Image: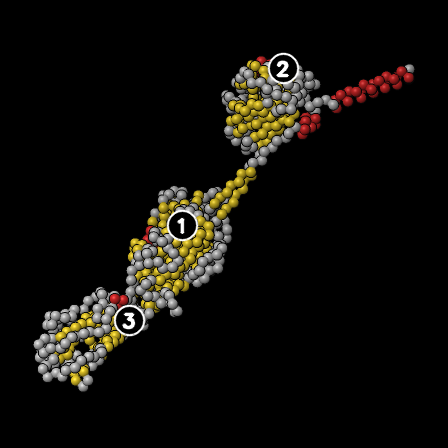
Amino acid sequence: MRRNAVSISSAAVLFTTIVISLLGGVGSLFVSPVSAAELTSRFLELSDSRAAQTSVTYNVGFNITTAGTLGSIQLMFCSNSSLISEPCVAPSGFDASNAVFAQETGVSGLSISAASTANDLILTRPPAPAAAVPVTLTFNNITNPAAQGSYYLRVLTYPTNDATGPNTDNGGMAFDMNAAVDVHVQVPPYLLFCTGNTITGTDCTTASGDFVELGALSTARTSSGQSQMVIATNAQNGYNISVNGSTLTSGNNTIAANMAAAPAQTGVSQFGINLRKNSTPNVGEDPSGTGIGTPLANYDQPNLYTYNNGDTVASATGVTDYRKFTISYIVNISKSQSPGIYASTFTYVALSNF
Amino acid sequence: MKKTSIRFGRLVNLVTATLLLAITIAPAVANQSYALGGLVQSRFIQLSNSSPSATSVTYNVSFKPTTTNTVGGIVVDFCNDSPIIFSGTCTFPTNFTLGATPAVSGLAGFSTSTGSWVTTNSLQCGAAAGQKQVLLYTNTTAQTPSGTGTAINFQITGVTNPSATGTFYARIYTFDTSADTTAGYTCGTATTRGVGSGTTGVMDYGGAALSTVTQISISATVQEQLTFCVSGSTISGTCSGLTTPSLTIGSGAPPVLDTTGEGTPAYTQLTTNASNGVVVRMKATNACSNGGLSTAPPDVAGGCASIAGIGSAAAVLTAGTYGMCVAPGAGVTAATNYADTVNSCPTTFNATSKYGMNGTNLTSTYGDQVYSTTGAVNAISSSMTFAAKAAATTPAGVYQGNEILIATGTF
């Protein structure tokens, strides 16, 4: 009977359900007979991510998940895996053996255990209660791994003070050694210098005119004119601007230049320049612009004029942004001045001292 | 006489043979069947969960009737010992229950739908007090099956599986009327049954085997991942084709920086499964320790000269300043200080683009945040354009800066 009963059962639909439960764990799931909780919000912040760099600061952060007795925290730096079930391969070149424990938050009383190694930092204290709070641990003077790439840190908390026995919480994190960006810029020696009858502001593109007409010379009045020049340079030692050219000449006749700075005087043959705003006559402008530089003393006195071929008329001692100078020209003649067309060409030379 | 004896012996042999034959072909029922129907076909009970002691399990019962005689009651009895129908005994599957009042839904397979099907006549038998072991699903108005080729099907919900792992059984019966069901299917004791093949009204019958099993657990672990690379040229694939990120800002041969401004990019790529994202910071080192570009002696007599960072807020580069902007990839957000909201940070200098370079933050312990993600990303590339503009007063020389990029993932 029993055999027949079995036969009927066989003839029926024998139904057995096998349920396969697929547990996909993303993150560090520790398969353990006694499962520890996972530390949350864990990170490792470095002060320098360059391989082999020394004196690096490591700031480890995590949230303690399980409140309870805390006696030690273990930090294992590995090159192969963040999983605590796997063997930990020490990163080549990494060295925390001289680490200085600089700061702790969320916990207190921890210090580096003598049992720590180059890649296995153990912080210890007398076991005491710890709340489930955020924790940060800061270490100075760590040497980074020698090669670029990804590395791992495993953090485990223990109720014991020597990181032995079952851990309470654990978690892993990854960090990276990578190349730094080197930026190079070459700033070349730079000198901008322009002249003209007029220059708008300090814009050399507006420089215009190269001929100063002084008109008919008179014994009764001073003839005057002006030109302008702009300079800018990144020369560390500044610049000198010199003027070159003879005094006003007509054939064999010249109008004598003031060798020393002197006022304009009608009825006296004289030629002179300065780089200031004058009232007698009313000609010229004071230096302007955001740059530095001043006329030399002989050419820096209003209403006093001088000229010596080759004189330095303006200078600066360092780099300068745009600086504009206005050169004032004055001419007077005596009754004995020979008639003729008196002219000269003045060349201004700017020399930057790098 | 001998002849007579032989005939008797032959007769005896013939009778014996007949008896043996009868036993052999006896069906798997406790007694010779005289049911109105027969053995239901295509019968099964499908469980939604086979774990021992699982609760809220749905049992999907299905069988094909052998006749289209009207059905007033369906019985499903769960036993631990055997599926033998009409057996007078039924061992209770430990901790099994159909609930205080079995819940049944989805009844199909009848061509009529009059009256109401109820479970209130279900039996406790071996179940705990207030619980039910035997389902009596009855309708005072008997219903007509759609046909012998159409399964009668319904679901019993809220079932608690037996606590033991292994096989247990169900015995399925149909009755002609509700009254015959309740009168015919009884529990004398927790483990005895009053039903038999001669019970009035019983029609179709059949047994089924069920099983609770240990679950197979599979676990897989994925470790934390953070891959961050920096290159002087575009990055192909996953951090492949990297070139040294040594950038020269300038134009011409050799490249020099003038007052019009120049820029050049570096490229980064980030892959991580950090669920809380990644922050990328930049830390600047230069001779003047101000986060800009600087030159030292012999280019500069004493001390150092620099092209200083543009400042803490993204802005158009002015003469004598240095800055950087981020063109973020998908899922990446540039920090406000380094976001070019005007031109989306092209890889060449743009006079209207905005650049940032916060010297104070860049020279702090961990640097200044330049971009970030809120979650995991896969091989996402972002570019960073470094730009500078000389001033007329920027001393001649070679200026350098070393920008360290640090990625921090929060897992």
- The residue pinned by badge 2 equals B201
Real-space Cα separation, disc 1 to disc 2, in angstroms: 74 Å
Establish if A245 lies above or below B120: below
Where is the C terminus of chain A found, in terms of image quarters?
bottom left
Classify residue A280 as left or right of residue B218.
left
Tell me which residue sits at (37%, 64%) in the image. Answer: B249
In-front residue for pair B212/B118: B118
Tell me, yes or no, if residue A323 can be seen here. no
The answer to the question of whether label 3 and label 1 lie on touching residues, with beta carbons closer than 8 A, is no
Identify the image quadrant of residue A121.
bottom left
- The residue pinned by badge 1 equals B332
Tell me which residue sits at (64%, 24%) in the image. Answer: B149
Tell me which residue sits at (35%, 67%) in the image. Answer: B256
The answer to the question of whether label 3 and label 2 lie on touching residues, with beta carbons closer than 8 A, is no
Kind of residue at badge 1: Val
Q: Describe the element under mark 1 as helix, strand or loop.
A: loop
Instruction: Name the chain under label 1.
Output: B
